[in-house]
Amino acid sequence: MSNVYDNWERLVEAVIRREQIWQMFHDQSPSVSSISSNSSLDFQDLDVPLDFSSAGGSSAYQQLPPPTVENLQKKEKSVEKEVSGLVFIQGFSPVFDLDEILKSTAEFLGRGTFGSAYISSMDNGITVVLKRLNAVNIPEKKFRQHMKVIGNVRHDNVSALRAYYFSKEEKLMVYDHYSNGSVSAMLHGKIEGNRAPLDWETRLRIAVGAARGIAHIHKQSGGKLVHGNIKSSNIFLNSNQYGCLSDHGLASMIPSPVRNAGYHAPEVKNTRNVSQASDVYSFGILLLELLTRKSLLHAIGGNEAVGLVKLVNSVNGKERAANVFDVELLRNRSIEEQMIKTLEIGMSCVANTPRRRPKMAQVVKMMEDIRTMNTRPNLVFIEGVNPDFYLDDMLRASAEVLGRGKFGTSYKATLGNGSTIAVKRLREVIVTSKEFQRQMEVIGRMKHENVSTLTAYHCSRDEKLIVYDYYGTGSASSMLHGKTGENKISLDWKTRLRIAVGAARGIAHIHTQVGQNLVHGNVKTSNIFLTTQGYGCVTDVGLATLMSTTAVLDSRSSGYRAPEVTDTKKLSQASDVYSFGVVLLELLTGKPSIISEDNEKDIHLVWWVASVVREYWTVEVFDIKLLLWDSDMEEAMVTFLQIALNCVKSVPEHRPKMSEVVWMLEDISGTNSEA
C-alpha cells in the first residue's frame, strides 16, 4: 500500500517528533492502533535519521560526528516550527493540530487533478478530508494569499476550507468530510458498493446545489474566480441533500495537464486556460451524467468509445428519452418533461463556442424553474393540508388493493413515515386537466365530518390519482358482505342506523354545494366508511362528472343505478337518492345490491324486496340477525324500510330530497343535525 500513500512518510518525518515516530513502530505503543490497517509507511528513502531508541535512552545521534549532530538538531528545531504552521481559516476553531491529523486513522480516497485525498479520523472524534497537493512551486506568500481567497468562499453548496499547511516540501488543505461519498461514486460505484438507486428528486437537488455553488464562486474576486475542476467526483451531498462542490479555486494556482478531458471544454484542451465559461461546460457534462448515468466515455454498439456530448448528439431528438436517459428514471413518466428541459440546459452548457454558453447565474435560474415545476412532481395538496409526503414517496409505498370500482382501483398505501393513506387510481377520465383540477378544488373545499376528506391529487397525461384519508375499519360493503373471518363483522341495528344517518348527512351536504347542483354520482356501500364515532362517511364524491359514459353505466354498479340513468345516461341528485335507498335496503336485509343464487337469474335487491313485501309479511325482508338481536326494534325497522322504498321509487320526482331523508332517519335514531 506504500504506493497508495504516495510517499506519505516524508510528511510524517517532517512534522512528528522522534519519540512519536519511535512509538509508532513499537508493539507496546498506544499510537499503533491509531494507524489505519490500510496504511503502509515506507521510510527507506528518508534523508533524516530517526531515533528508534527509547525516549529515555541514549540518543540515536551518539554514533555520529558532533558537527553532523548539531546540524540535524538545528533542522529538527526548524521542523518543530513548521508543526505550528497549520493555519485555520478565520471562523474555524483550531480544535486539532497537524500532529493529530498525521497520527489519525487514515483512509485513501483517491488521486485527482491536483493531488491525493485522504479521510482523517482523529481520536477526538473529528473527521476531516486532507488534500495533499501535487508538487507546487509557488512562494509561501502567494500560496497563503490564494488560500485566503479560497477560504473566504462561504456558501451552503461549496465545501468549506477549514485549514491549510505550507512547507517547502508539503502543501496540505483540510476540508469538511461528507459521509455519503461523491456523486461519482453514487452514479458509477459498484452495485454491491457505493452505487445505489438515485431518484429524480435527488439528482435534481445535486444539479441545483452544484449550480448554486458554481454561480457563487463566479461572483468572488470581482467576478473573476474560477472553479476549474468541476466533475462528479468533486461534488458531494450537504446536510440538506443538495450538491456541494469541493476543490474550487486550485486550477488558477496549480498549472496541470488536462487529465479529465471528458469534462474540459474544447478550448481548455488547446490553451490549458480555464475560465468561467469552461466551468459552465463542465457543469453541462455533469447534467448529462445525472440524466444518463453513463460514464464520460461510452461505447455504442461495440464501437470505439465516444464522449457524452457526442453520444447525446448522435441520437435523434425524438428518440433521446428512450435511448439516452437512465432507464431507472424512465420508469416514472411524470418527470419526463423535467428531464427533457434539463437535457436542453445541459446541451446549451456544452456548446462548442464559449460565448454561446449561458452564465451560471442563468443556469441556476433555469434549474430552479425546473424544480419548481414540480418539486416532487405533480402531487397537489388541498389548501390547508400540510404535505408530509410526495408523489415519489407514494409510488414507493407498500400498496394493497382495496377494491376495483366503476371509476378505478383503490389502494391502501403505507408510506415510509408509517402513515397510511387511501389512493384511487382513476380510469376513463374524459375531461381536460384544467377541468379535473377545478373539480378537485371543489371537492377539496367540501369539509364535512360525513364526507371523506380529499388530501391531494395528481394529474398528468397518463395518470389521475386522488388521495383520501384511510379508514381502517373497511367499507360498509365489506362489513356486510365480506367473507367470514376476514372483513365481515356482525352489525347490530344501532350500528347500521348510524351508518345510514351519517351517509345521509354527507350526501345531503354534497347536494348543497356548487349552488345546490353538485351530485355524488356513485353512492354505494363500498363507498361508505365509518368515522371514529361510528357514523357513515361517504367517499368518491363528484367523480361521476369526470368519467366516460361507459364508466357511469358500469354493469357492476347496476344494482344502485336509478332507472332514468340507464335511459338518459345523466346523473342527478334524485338518482343519488335512489342509490342511497338501495344502501338502506342492504343495511336492512344484509343482502347485496344484486342477488345471485345458484341456477337462478340475478335479481336486483330493489325487485326482490318489492316482491317479498307484496307476497309475504314485511318482516321477511329483514336480516335474520337483526330480528334475533333487536326484536324490540321491529317498528323502527319497518319505518326504515318505508324510507328506503320511498327513495327507490321509479319516478324521480316522487323521491324525497336528501335533507328530508336525513330528518326521517334522525327521527328514528333519536339524533338531530343542522341538515
Image (cartoon, helix red, strand yellow):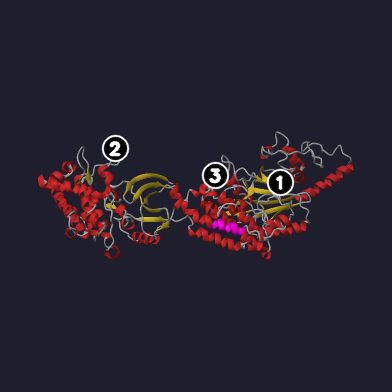
Residue 319, percent from left and from top: 53, 52
State the residue at coordinates (20%, 37%): 599
Residue under label 2, please give it: 485
Residue under label 3, please give it: 196
Quick one: label 2 or label 3, which is nearer the N terminus?
Answer: 3
Magenta-highlighted residues: 341-349
Label 1 with label 3: CB-CB less than 8 Å: no
Residue 478, percent from left and from top: 28, 44
Disc 3 packing (10 Å; few <14; some 14–19; many ≥20): some
Q: Main secondary structure of the magenta part?
A: helix
Type of amino acid under label 3: Ala
Q: Would you say residue 343 sits in the magenta stretch?
A: yes
Judged by depth in the image, the label closer to the viewer, 2 or 3, is 3
| Element class at badge 2 | loop
State the residue at coordinates (24%, 42%): 490
Q: Is residue 507 above or below residue 61?
A: below
Disc 2 packing (10 Å; few <14; some 14–19; many ≥20): few
Residue under label 1, please give it: 99
Q: Would you say residue 443 sits in the magenta stretch?
A: no
Residue 221, percent from left and from top: 68, 64
Q: Report, in whole angstroms, how far the alpha carbon at label 2 lies from the one at label 3.
A: 42 Å
Q: Report, in whole angstroms, how far the alpha carbon at label 1 lies from the one at label 2.
A: 71 Å
